Amino acid sequence: MLHRERVLQTIAHRQPDRPPKGELLIDPDFLALYEPGYTDGFATCLRVLDDFDLDIVSEDLPRPAPRQIGTSARGLPIMEDCWGVHYEYAQDGLHYLDFLVPEPKAADAFAFPDPAIYRADNLVRWKEETDRCVFAIIGGTFDNLVPLVGFDTLMFWSVEAPDALSTLAWKAARFNVALAEISAAGGADVILVADDIAYNSGTFVSPAVLRAVFFPPMQWLVNEVHRRTGLPCFLHSDGNLNAVIDDIVQCGFDGLHSLQPSAGMDIRHIKRIYGSRLCLMGNIDLDYLLPRGTPEEIEAHVRALARDLAPGGGWILSTCNTLSRAVPVANARAMYHAIDKPGMR
């Protein structure tokens, strides 16, 4: 069975020849661990996919490169991205220097960039040169607002200025639907909405605020992705989503990724309740099991999951986030090949 066919069959809740395998992303730092000094990211990633027999490759639409517009008082480069966001590079990551929507009344005037500046060349290459199932990553209606207003401000406005956030969330939805169309034209097989809405103990804002402000444009986004592209649509979010899984289903998502076990996401329970409506992807622990466990522990864990989750389709083997340098290559290989053993097909 072709990789693409296997994934689409399981998303449709039909039994494939074996459970599909794949990742939200394979980080460049894992590629460097796998092949030190690599120079061709596509070729090295393909070698990883072949070695682990992965069915999925995930890519976003690269933004145009940011430009340096100055130097900060700390001697760090000040960058401006294609959205107009200003930030400085530091050892601990990006530091936003200002926000494009500094007050609620500025929400009406803010415009997202022209989606046409995004290109799908990377998707085209995976589609044309491999038979992998191509997941195209776009944004949603919550996380895209953080660079615009700041995380702390977003929390405050969720109570004090929800109408301004609603205005921005609807603009984000329209922008991301356009990216989904570009992705589909480039050969994407699945659209994955990456939109972290939760942390380990619950959602960042209350479920009531999500339902009033963020889920209505998200539901429209999913419906439009289905209508305009005909492709399945997944949601990625880390954290504890237990309070809003019904809402995620109501938004129309075909699949859910992360299912972080350390955040209380019980994938077996979720499969029992929602298995006919959601294809579940993820749940393999990145806090202890994959970084620190033995290959034998990992294989036993994955095989037990597969016995409970694989029947009837609707389950994709994956880590609960991304494949990074924290995961030894031998442990990643043990995870993915666990379901190739007799009795798992």
Image (tube, helix red, strand yellow):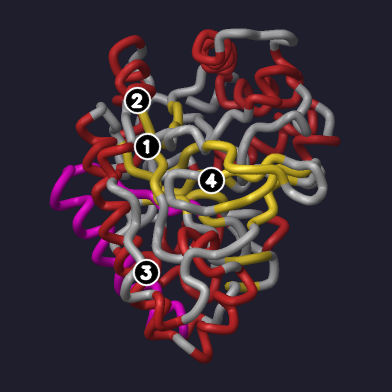
Mark 4: secondary structure = strand
Q: Quick check: is 18 in the magenta stretch?
A: no
Give the labeled residue for mark 1: 136
Q: Amino acid at mark 1?
A: Ala
Mark 1: secondary structure = strand
Give the labeled residue for mark 3: 169
Determine which quarter of the picture holds residue 135: top left
> In this rendering, would 29 be left or right of 248?
right
The mark closer to the camera, 2 or 4, is 4
Q: Gap between marks 2 and 4, in whole Å?
A: 26 Å
Give the labeled residue for mark 2: 123
> In this rendering, would 102 be left or right of 227?
right
> In this rendering, would 301 be left or right of 222?
right
Circles 2 and 4, Cβ within 8 Å, touching? The answer is no
The crowd level at tag 4 (other Cα within 10 Å; few <14, some 14-19, many 20+) is some
Give the labeled residue for mark 4: 80
Between disc 1 and disc 3, whose residue precedes? 1
Q: Which mark is residue 263?
A: none
Q: Nearer the viewer, residue 197 or 281?
A: 197
| In the image, residue 84 above or below residue 200 | above
